[in-house]
Image: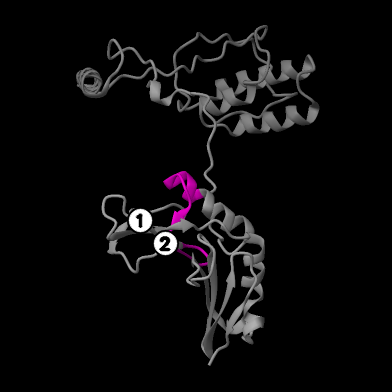
């Protein structure tokens, strides 16, 4: 059993110099090892590395330590080069289990083989050991381009934006009829390959591929953008009140832009119909392209 520590650590015998030996941190400590650590702690107190409180705490831990690792931890932060005690060398020597070297070698071969196969299939560098990054992953400095196609079409910006989308898609804004819903639209245009057919396009953030339909009537295509968008939007927004329909009861609203069917109207004149539906009836307002000359059909 370890004898009590007299004085600071109780070791009054001759100075012991331990031969450096390779032990592990889990090696069991002897009383002599505990005494040696106490001497180191005494020296640290004497040269000001430890306070009295720290010295007492560490001495108490040293007397209870059971392994060399616990003892070394008590002096790991101290300067012990001038200490008369040589501390055990705790560097651990590990031996690989039998056959480990062979397994490691096989693993290295397999990894290198996988690298070579991957380079052969997908590599774009001179060799599989050339780690130049994929050119497609490099920064190209091109800023993001955000597309802002109109979606709220029952507004001044939405309606004018819809005509601009027509110009970009078709090169003009001509057609037989344009129907505009709150978030989509449909457009009938002449079929350049056959004047007996109509190409019907749907707009939902962009013009989709057309469907082919027989041409209805013998009217000519006109410039459907020849309206006053501001006046038409004003009529559209006031339509429920004009027709005596409570805004909360409205279930659907859309407008139709088409050639004026009045034989006395000037060529290319337009007529705009605003349709409002509710659970209690539907009505419409027809105006010319400038929002004037209204014809009101009240819900019946």
Residue 88's spot in the image, x, y percent? 52, 15
**78 left or right of 111 in image:** right
In the picture, the quarter occupied by the N terminus is top right
Mark 1 neighbour density, 10 Å: few (under 14) some (14–19) many (20 or more):
some
Residue 62's spot in the image, x, y percent? 62, 29
Mark 2 neighbour density, 10 Å: few (under 14) some (14–19) many (20 or more):
many
The circle drawn on residue 280 is none
Residue 136's spot in the image, x, y percent? 39, 25
| Residue plotted at (54% across, 84% down) | 283
Q: Earlier in the sequence, mark 1 or mark 2?
A: 2
Q: Which residue is farthest front?
A: 264
Q: Depth check: give the residue in front, 148 or 219.
A: 219
Span highlighted in magenta in the image? 165-184
Q: Please report contact status of discs 1 and 2: CB closer than 8 Å, yes or no.
A: yes
Q: Which residue is farthest bottom?
A: 300
| Residue plotted at (79% across, 25% down) | 51
Residue 243's spot in the image, x, y percent? 62, 84
Q: Image quarter for residue 42?
A: top right
Q: Image quarter for residue 82?
A: top right
Separation (CA) of disc 1 from disc 2: 7 Å
Q: Depth check: give the residue in front, 272 or 238.
A: 272
> Which residue is disc 1 drawn over?
190
Q: Height in image: 219 above or below 128?
A: below
């Amino acid at each position: 059993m370890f004898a009590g520590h007299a004085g600071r650590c109780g070791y009054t015998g001759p100075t012991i110099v331990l031969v450096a030996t390779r032990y592990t941190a889990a090696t069991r400590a002897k009383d002599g090892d505990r005494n040696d650590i106490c001497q180191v702690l005494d020296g640290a107190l004497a040269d000001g590395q430890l306070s009295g409180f720290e010295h007492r705490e560490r001495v108490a831990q040293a007397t209870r330590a059971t392994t060399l690792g616990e003892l070394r931890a008590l002096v790991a932060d101290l300067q012990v080069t001038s200490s008369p005690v040589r501390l055990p060398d705790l560097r651990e020597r590990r031996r690989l289990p039998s056959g480990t070297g062979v397994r490691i070698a096989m693993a290295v071969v397999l990894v290198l083989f996988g690298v070579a196969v991957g380079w052969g299939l997908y590599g774009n560098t001179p060799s599989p050991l050339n780690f130049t990054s994929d050119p497609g992953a490099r920064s190209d400095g091109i800023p993001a381009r955000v597309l802002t196609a109109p979606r709220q079409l029952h507004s001044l910006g939405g309606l004018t934006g819809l005509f601009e989308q027509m110009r970009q898609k078709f090169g003009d804004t001509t057609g037989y009829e344009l129907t505009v819903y709150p978030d989509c639209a449909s457009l009938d245009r002449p079929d350049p390959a056959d004047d007996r057919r109509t190409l019907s396009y749907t707009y939902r953030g962009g013009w989709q591929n057309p469907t082919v339909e027989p041409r209805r009537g013998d009217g000519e295509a006109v410039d459907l953008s020849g309206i006053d968008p501001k006046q038409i939007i004003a009529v559209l927004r006031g339509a429920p009140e004009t027709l005596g329909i409570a805004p909360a009861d409205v279930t659907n609203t859309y407008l139709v832009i088409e050639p004026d069917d009045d034989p006395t109207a000037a060529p290319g004149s337009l007529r705009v119909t605003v349709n409002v539906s509710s659970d209690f009836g539907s009505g419409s307002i027809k105006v010319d392209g400038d929002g004037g000359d209204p014809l009101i059909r009240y819900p019946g």
